[in-house]
Image: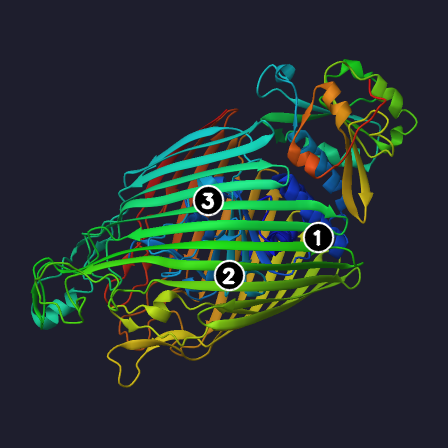
């Protein structure tokens, strides 16, 4: 059968080298969502979608699209790009703010709807300026800050396992 | 323990999937890991290999839950048939699925559950080993080749690590049943939740089967009957292999800590035949095992250090019940006639306490260094034996036809109550020499209180030859610790030898992994596996029986080929072929074939449906010179499984040995026509997730 496999396959296409660091970050975001609890009323049905919104564009946003349809606590992930629509029109559960949104991210955070949204970004200062999880790279490794006050105020519960791996900060400017 | 594997097991094995370099596979693998595992994985890769994934310094295979579901495996043994170089051999005693790697003995396979070896002191593989139910399995990590430099004893020809579903990994609740041929009924539940910040996981499976009933024309007693003109043998008849099993696992995780408690037992287990392949309808055996583990894992202990620690306790109990009936009722020899047959009731219990701590240091540029140490205390603390033949408690021959006599706590019991202590240390450095070259060097030192110290190094050079080709050259030394049976316990066939040293091996692997296209992955592996100090029972002048001794050397050379092809979005093929060359030098394991092949196809012909067909081929098995029977025929065994997944429901139906092939397991001359394997059989399965 191996001979057949070798012979039956059309000319190989060389796979592009994957950027593993973005793949890891995407897997991190998947785990952030897994290890966060939303209030019980968040979903009408156990199999309703977990909406993962993205604001702006970068490689991580591209990579994240692969999470579409994956299950988190029974909820299929639905990736939705905010494009230019306001946040309030989307029922986001998770929001990834892309690196392209540096000038706008504070405005985005202020326009968050009332329901709890787990905000994540690689932008420097994100967690100290009102975001919940800030991803950064150190020694070639993906690390993250969690602003626990913001998470708590928004009604999200973050697993102790996630917190044990994070640098946890508070923030006096939280509303 | 998937989050907190003991020591280096994690860091090395978590890289396993790196062999598959399909982007989709990688993400799938990342998502299947717990967050702790993901962080560990990234750190290892980031510090040592600059994020190129196809470089793990070992020959590895990973089996996922998807593989298990698709192929319709119901037991660990079923799924391992598809791994190159692995053969599952059915033992006529207890119908045990023994796991052999690369033509070697089953005792040369290291089997771990969540990084904890599940062997026992006395019988190594568990006297009533029945494999493991797949409902508890999250994934299986397999290394072909030596692993003693990392895992210590018995990682001689291959290593299996079964990762179970534990807290934080079980996302939904499931109830399921499966019913099938041989009056087999299985039910299981799993549940995962979070309470007060504690992740909780629970799985339980109950299994009951009458077992398949091979028809045996002549058994170990038949020939004796012919010689002595007696009629004691129960053959021809069918053998009964029924049993009942329970498997219950509970786990708890919070922050850096994790607790796991596992209980598994077999009851009413019919061993069917004795070790000498004589019908034994009397034995209804039982065993139980529990493990309690406390684990600590800190990925940010220090900017340059990750830390793992584990404290574990294991307790094992065995009982042969009313058996073993070593010879049938009416058996006669020169001491007289035994109306109840020769009876040998054995009960024993063992316990183990093990502690291990390890750290991954990433403070030196281009190096990932793993260092660890541990201590294990293993105690055969209870041995009970009743016999009605042989030597009694006072060393005097028992009269034929007499009652059962207790010989526990005498020199004539099957084993002494004894303790073994093991101290170990290990160190491994993964050095990223350049973008394309990586060198792994490591060693492990084990000191056994009974047979002494052993030192096992390994070296692996990984070369990213091109974007699509990875070449690996690996050299590793390994050992198998002599069992209590070999060291201290007299059996009907052999005397022990407390002067035994470990069995040793030196293996060289040369491996090529080639990504032919986005959808096609090929690999080729060549190995030279040299064993020395092989432990075998041999004739020694002046001794009444054979005695275990460290004897000669034996070399096995082999080639393993693998392919994985995603032909279409909904069509996947994989297959492998292995061939080995070994001398007929008295150490060759004739029970195993020298060639095997496997092919598998998965077709998602409609959304929500998957159809799988797999076929496993074993080459003919020749006989040793002393056996005049013709070689045992080769065979193909084909299975097919259809699976349908709705929102919360999942249904599967499977036919095993689809073409009803008359396949046989190689057996010694006692079973003249060799042990028949199960005929065509079926099951259906239903799961409900909520």
Q: Is residue A10 visible?
A: no
Q: Residues within 10 Å of mark 3 (few under 14, many from 20)?
A: many
For label 3, the residue is B613
C-beta proximity under 8 Å, tags 3 and 1: no
Q: Earlier in the sequence, mark 2 or mark 3?
A: 2
Regarding mark 2 in the picture, which secondary structure is present there?
Answer: strand
Q: Earlier in the sequence, mark 2 or mark 1?
A: 1
Judge whether B247 appears above or below B526 on screen: above
Q: Residue at x 45, y 67 (%)?
A: B481
Q: Position of residue B500 (x, y in %)?
A: 41, 75
Which residue is nearer to you in this view: B320 or B531?
B320
Cα–Cα span, label 2 and label 1: 23 Å
What is the distance, in whole Å, between disc 2 and disc 3 at their CAs? 27 Å
With respect to residue B359, does B588 lie above or below?
below
Chain letter for the residue marked with disc 1 in the picture: B
The mark closer to the camera, 3 or 1, is 1
Left or right: B343 with respect to B247?
left
Eye-nearest disc, 2 or 3 = 2
x and y percentages locating residue A8 in the rendered image: 60, 52
Residue B158 shows which numbered tag? Answer: 2
- The residue that appears at 61% across and 29% down in the rendered structure is B197
User: Mark 3, chain letter?
Assistant: B
**Label number found at residue B44:** 1
Is B121 left or right of B598, judged from the image as shown?
left
Would you say residue B37 is visible in this rendering? yes
Which element type, helix, strand or loop, lies under badge 1? helix
Please name whichever residue, A157 or B279, is drawn nearer the observer in this view of the structure: A157
User: Earlier along the polypeptide chain: callout 3 or callout 1?
Assistant: 1
Residues behind callouts 2 and 1 on a single chain:
yes
């Amino acid at each position: 059968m191996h001979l057949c496999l070798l012979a039956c396959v059309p000319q190989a296409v060389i796979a592009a080298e994957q950027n593993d660091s973005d793949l890891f970050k995407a897997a991190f975001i998947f785990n952030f969502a897994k290890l966060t609890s939303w209030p019980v009323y968040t979903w009408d049905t156990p199999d309703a979608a977990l909406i993962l919104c993205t604001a702006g564009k970068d490689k991580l946003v591209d990579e994240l699209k692969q999470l579409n349809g994956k299950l988190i606590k029974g909820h299929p992930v639905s990736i939705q790009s905010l494009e230019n629509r306001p946040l309030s029109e989307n029922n986001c559960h998770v929001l990834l703010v892309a690196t392209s949104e540096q000038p706008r991210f504070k405005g985005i955070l202020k326009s968050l709807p009332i329901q709890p949204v787990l905000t994540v970004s690689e932008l420097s200062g994100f967690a100290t300026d009102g975001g919940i999880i800030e991803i950064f790279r150190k020694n070639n490794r993906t690390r993250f800050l969690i602003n626990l006050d913001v998470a708590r105020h928004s009604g999200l519960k973050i697993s102790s396992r996630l917190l044990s791996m994070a640098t946890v900060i508070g923030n006096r400017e939280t509303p | 323990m998937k989050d907190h594997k003991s020591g280096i097991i994690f860091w090395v094995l978590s890289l396993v999937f790196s062999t598959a370099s399909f982007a989709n596979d990688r993400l799938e693998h990342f998502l299947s890991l717990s967050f702790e595992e993901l962080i560990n994985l990234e750190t290892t890769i980031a510090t040592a290999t600059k994020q190129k994934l196809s470089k793990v310094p070992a020959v590895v295979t990973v089996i996922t839950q998807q593989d298990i579901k698709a192929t319709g495996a119901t037991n660990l043994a079923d799924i391992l048939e598809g791994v190159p170089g692995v053969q599952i051999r059915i033992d006529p005693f207890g119908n045990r699925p023994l796991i052999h790697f690369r033509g070697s003995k089953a005792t040369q396979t290291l089997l771990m559950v969540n990084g904890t070896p599940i062997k026992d002191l006395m019988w190594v593989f568990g006297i009533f080993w029945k494999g493991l139910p797949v409902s508890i399995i999250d994934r299986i990590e397999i290394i072909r080749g030596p692993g003693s430099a990392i895992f210590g004893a018995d990682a001689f020809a291959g290593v299996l690590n079964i990762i179970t579903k534990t807290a934080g990994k079980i996302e939904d609740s499931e109830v399921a049943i499966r019913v099938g041929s041989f009056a087999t009924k299985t039910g299981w539940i799993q549940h995962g939740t979070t309470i007060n910040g504690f992740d909780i996981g629970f799985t339980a499976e109950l299994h009951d089967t009458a077992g398949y009933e091979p028809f045996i024309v002549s058994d170990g007693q038949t020939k004796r009957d012919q010689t002595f003109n007696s009629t004691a043998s129960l053959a021809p008849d069918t053998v009964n292999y029924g049993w009942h099993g329970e498997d219950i696992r509970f786990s708890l995780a919070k922050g850096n800590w994790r607790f796991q408690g596992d209980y598994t037992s077999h009851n009413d287990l019919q061993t069917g035949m004795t070790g000498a392949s004589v019908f034994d309808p009397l034995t209804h055996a039982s065993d139980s095992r529990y493990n309690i583990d406390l684990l600590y894992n800190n990925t940010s202990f220090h900017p340059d250090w990750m830390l793992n620690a584990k404290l574990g306790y294991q307790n094992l109990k065995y009982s042969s019940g009313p058996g073993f009936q070593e010879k049938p009722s009416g058996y006669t020899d020169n001491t007289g006639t035994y109306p109840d047959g020769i009876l040998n009731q054995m009960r024993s219990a063992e316990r183990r306490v093990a502690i291990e701590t390890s750290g991954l240091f990433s403070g030196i540029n281009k190096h990932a260094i793993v260092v660890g140490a541990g201590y294990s205390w293993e105690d055969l603390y209870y041995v009970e034996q009743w016999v009605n033949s042989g030597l009694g408690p006072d060393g005097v021959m028992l009269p034929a036809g007499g009652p059962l006599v207790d010989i526990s706590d005498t020199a004539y019991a099957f084993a002494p109550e004894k303790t073994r202590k093991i101290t170990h240390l290990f160190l491994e450095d993964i050095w990223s020499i350049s973008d394309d070259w990586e060198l792994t060097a490591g060693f492990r030192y084990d000191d056994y209180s009974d047979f002494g110290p052993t030192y096992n190094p390994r070296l692996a050079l990984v070369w990213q030859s091109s974007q699509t080709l990875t070449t690996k050259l690996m050299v590793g030394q390994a050992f198998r610790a002599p069992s209590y049976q070999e060291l201290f316990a007299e059996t009907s066939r052999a005397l022990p030898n407390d002067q035994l040293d470990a069995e040793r091996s030196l293996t060289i692997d040369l491996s090529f992994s080639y990504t032919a296209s986005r959808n096609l992955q090929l690999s080729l592996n060549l190995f030279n596996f040299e064993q020395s100090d092989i432990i075998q029972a041999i004739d020694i002048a002046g001794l009444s029986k054979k005695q275990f001794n460290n004897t000669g050397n034996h070399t096995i050379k082999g080639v393993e080929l693998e392919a994985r092809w995603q032909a279409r979005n909904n069509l996947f093929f994989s297959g492998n072929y292995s061939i080995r060359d070994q001398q007929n030098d008295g150490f060759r394991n004739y029970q195993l074939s020298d060639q095997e092949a496997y092919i598998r196809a998965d077709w998602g012909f409609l959304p929500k449906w998957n159809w799988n067909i797999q076929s496993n081929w074993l080459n003919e098995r020749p006989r040793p010179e002393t056996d005049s029977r013709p070689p045992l025929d080769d065979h193909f065994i084909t299975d097919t499984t259809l699976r349908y997944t709705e929102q919360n429901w999942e249904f599967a139906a499977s036919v095993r040995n689809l073409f009803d092939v008359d396949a046989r397991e190689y057996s010694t001359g006692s079973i003249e026509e060799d042990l028949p394997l199960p005929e065509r059989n079926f099951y259906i399965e239903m799961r409900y997730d909520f």
